[in-house]
Amino acid sequence: MTSAVSEFPRLTELSHGGGCGCKISPSVLAELLKSLPQTQAFPNLLVGAETADDAAVYRLNDEQAIVATTDFFMPIVDDPYDFGRIAAANALSDVYAMGGTPILALALVGMPINVLPRDTIASVLRGGDSLCAEAGIPIAGGHSIDSVEPIYGLAALGVVHPDHLTRNRDARAGDVLILSKALGVGILSAALKKNRLDDDAYQTMIASTTQLNRSGPALARLPGVHAMTDVTGFGLLGHTLELCTGAKLRARLRYAALPWLGPARDYVEAGLSTGASTRNWASYGHQVTLGADLTDTARTLLTDPQTSGGLLISCAADAAGPVLARLKADGFHHAIVIGEMTEGAPGVSVD
């Protein structure tokens, strides 16, 4: 894939990581957060940091709650406009995953001002603005700094009815798990950085990462939908484990059912991987049981960090049809049942 701004420094060359692969590993993050005070003293705080949910939620009254989140990262692609679009879609996903509707965003911008052309930086901002316009919200302000590595993202606010809030801790035994988007973003972005990604695969990645998870509010209102999260930097296994930990249940995933983006599996079989995948497995691999026939390729793919990934929905078995119908109607053509929640100690089995 040839960058549209190849005469300038490649965005991905200016950063040590990209997209949600920049996230601090789950084990290190847990260590950093464990000394912070708990938030139970705030009764209107419906969702805080205790269960690693996608956003904070604060109840205003019986009909309204505010959803608040922030997400930013270093470039996953070299095209600045696409970078801005991906980062914005990824940030808004946290609001959608809580069942919320975004209402406005603030831009978070860090750029090496003396390294990147002004037009490149402006294109990043335009990309983010275009995705927010697609979501029907303004970027109403923000904050910027001169930084060594390029960084872009949003602080996003949304609203949700407290009765339709979808927390990651509310999954139930017997629920089926539905994934809305195909996996493999981290692998494709790694291939891009090594100049091994062709134009078709690039467009496949861009189409997925810029697709808004706007089905979230409609799904949250469907009977039988119990929990929801989005799959991002900790990979499918990591975010499934968050559901399990919050609900004190176990998940069983069917590897053969998982959808993959373009040539992602081929790249892994050819030896391509990401450092974030290795960090993810080191953090939570002890809670995962892989089937005997699953190879290192499967492990790499299951822990692959997703950027602006799909929704992972835990719902009653008889709600799976309406959930899939809603997702397909909204253009999530890869949406599929990938497993179920069961009784047992928190963990994930993959067969």
Image: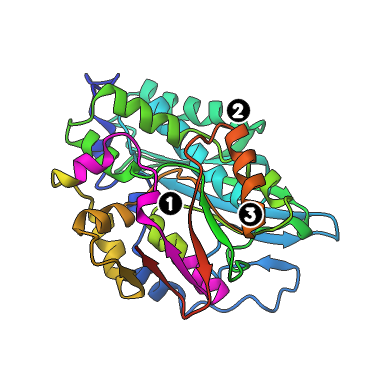
- Residue 47: x and y in percent read 65, 66
- Residue 35: x and y in percent read 47, 80
**The magenta stretch spans which residues?**
241-268
Per the image, the residue denoted by label 3 is 98
Q: Earlier in the sequence, mark 1 or mark 3?
A: 3
The crowding category of the residue bearing disc 2, from other C-alpha atoms within 10 Å (few below 14, some 14 to 19, many at least 20), is few
Q: Earlier in the sequence, mark 1 or mark 2?
A: 2
Per the image, the residue denoted by label 1 is 232
In the picture provided, is 26 more to the left or to the right than 226?
left
Per the image, the residue denoted by label 2 is 134
Q: CA separation, marks 1 and 2? A: 21 Å
Q: How is the image coloured?
A: rainbow
- Circle 2 — which element? helix
Quick check: can you spot residue 128? yes
Decide: is 286 above or below 81: below
| Residue 349 colored in magenta in the image | no
Q: CA separation, marks 1 and 3? A: 15 Å
- Circle 3 — which element? loop
- Residue 113: x and y in percent read 34, 33
Decide: is 17 above or below 174: above
The crowding category of the residue bearing disc 1, from other C-alpha atoms within 10 Å (few below 14, some 14 to 19, many at least 20), is many
Q: CA separation, marks 2 and 3? A: 19 Å
> What is the three-letter code of the residue carrying label 2?
Glu
> What is the three-letter code of the residue carrying label 3?
Met
> What is the three-letter code of the residue carrying label 1?
Thr
